[in-house]
Amino acid sequence: MEPEVKKKNEVWEWSKALLIAFGLAAIIRFFFFTPIVVDGESMMPTLEHGDRMIVNKIGYTVGDPDRFDIIVFHAPEEKDYIKRIIGLPGDHVAYENDQLYINGEAVEEPYLDAYKQGITGTLTEDFTLEERTNESTIPEGYVFVMGDNRRASKDSRHIGLVPMDEVIGSTNFVFWPMPEAGVVN
């Protein structure tokens, strides 16, 4: 084979490999996983402003959300929010004396323990689902979400219930900054 023909074949092979790699990366990002940057302090202390995370976009197409999953969804303000699922379809949600009640039973939120120690007063003001959403229970296809920094979070207490078709996916893996990298609960 002539050197010029061999060089053209090598360029063509590299071009094909790069096109396939970029195509696969685009498909994976569009359909399966996507990065997100935490914007704001509403999920502190669990997540810090500027944390970079991976969003699993396929998890809820093959399974159902769980209480306390951290999700990313399209908010009414044409912006994506990151919050924690507190209430699922069929649940009644209430807060009294800084205690979460689901269907009348006290539910622990261990991810808030460290944050509650550093404040005076309550972290979460008293409320019931009816007061915030005019619903007695969460309807099918919706979730009730809250940020971990309850005093500085715009969540279902303000924007209402989140339709599951607005949920982009769940996230629990920080990949940047490196000292913070890992799974969050």
Image: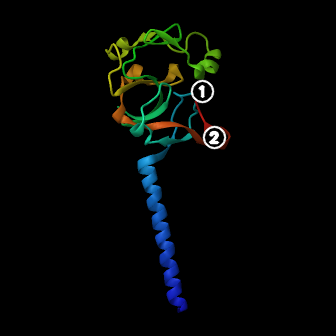
Left or right: residue 68 versus residue 74 is right
Label 1 CA crowd tier, 10 Å (few <14, some 14–19, many 20+): some
Question: How far across and how far down the image is residue 121, in percent?
Answer: 58, 9
Kind of residue at disc 1: Pro
Secondary structure of residue under mark 1: loop
- Residue lying at the far front of the rendered structure: 62
Mark number, residue 181 = 2
Which corner quadrant holds the C terminus? top right
Above or below, comparing residue 168 to residue 111 in the picture? below
What residue do we see at 51% from left, 19% from top? Answer: 151
Q: Nearer the viewer, mark 1 or mark 2?
A: 2
Tag 1 near tag 2, CB within 8 Å: no
Is the residue 131 above or below the residue 61 in the image?
A: above
Q: Which residue is mark 1?
A: 45
Q: How many marks?
A: 2
Residue 150's label in the rendered image is none
Residue visible at 60% across and 20% down in the picture: 110
